[in-house]
Amino acid sequence: MQTLLTHLAERDPSFLDRFASRKHGRTRRFIARARGDLYPGRPDLAELHAVEFVNGWWMGTNYSKRSILEIIKLASEVVGLRLGSDLKVKLGQKCRRSNKRLKTDGARSKKESSA
């Protein structure tokens, strides 16, 4: 998940702001600019289960596979990829990128060979 979010952020500079503005979990944020915002009221969890994955952006690392899939689905929606066809994910394994390239505005471009 960290690899995917990092890749999307590198390809689309507005991705993280757009992703962060969407509805997240019931009480926790999936990503945040402040580490403490990931686990409100639980600084102990923020200290143990947060990683700065892009300069100035933090993500939680204490998620179930179900939650990870929810986060990946949300990220896919934000950039306009279809989970399962444009983006294939097998939880517990490294992420495989689609051969679709992202434009900086997050829209899909025509299929191109990945480099």
Image (tube, rainbow, N blue to C red):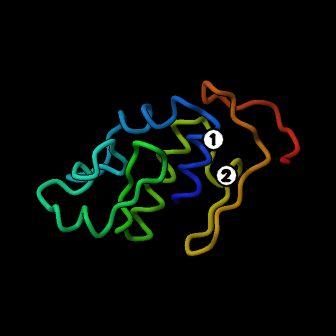
Please, which residue is most extreme toward the bottom here? 92
Residue 97 as seen in the image, left or right of residue 68: right
Label 2: few (<14), some (14–19) or many (≥20) C-alpha neighbours in 10 Å: some
Residue furthest to the left: 41
Position of 18 relative to 73 (above/below): above
In primary-sequence order, the first of circles 2 and 1 is 1
Residue at figure coordinates x 56%, y 70% from the top left? 91
In this rendering, the answer to whether 29 lies above or below 23 is: below
Residue closest to the eye, 96 or 34: 34
At x 44% / y 31%, what residue is drawn?
A: 18
Q: Which mark is residue 81?
A: 1
Q: What secondary structure is found at the residue carrying circle 2?
A: loop
Assess whether mark 1 and mark 2 are in contact (beta carbons under 8 angstroms): yes
Which residue in the rendered view is the most extreme toward the right?
A: 113
Q: Residues within 10 Å of mark 1 (few under 14, many from 20)?
A: many
Identify which residue is drawn at 79% across, 47% down.
99
User: Real-space Cα distance between discs 2 and 1?
Assistant: 7 Å
Residue 95, horizontal then vertical, whole percent: 64, 62
Residue 56 in which image quadrant: top left
Question: Residue placed farthest to the front in the image?
Answer: 55
**What's under tag 2, amino acid-wise?**
Leu
Residue 29: horizontal and vertical position, in percent?
29, 49
> How many numbered marks appear?
2
Horizontally, residue 14 falls left or right of residue 63, namely: right
Disc 2 target residue? 87
Q: Secondary structure at mark 1?
A: loop
At label 1, the amino acid type is Leu
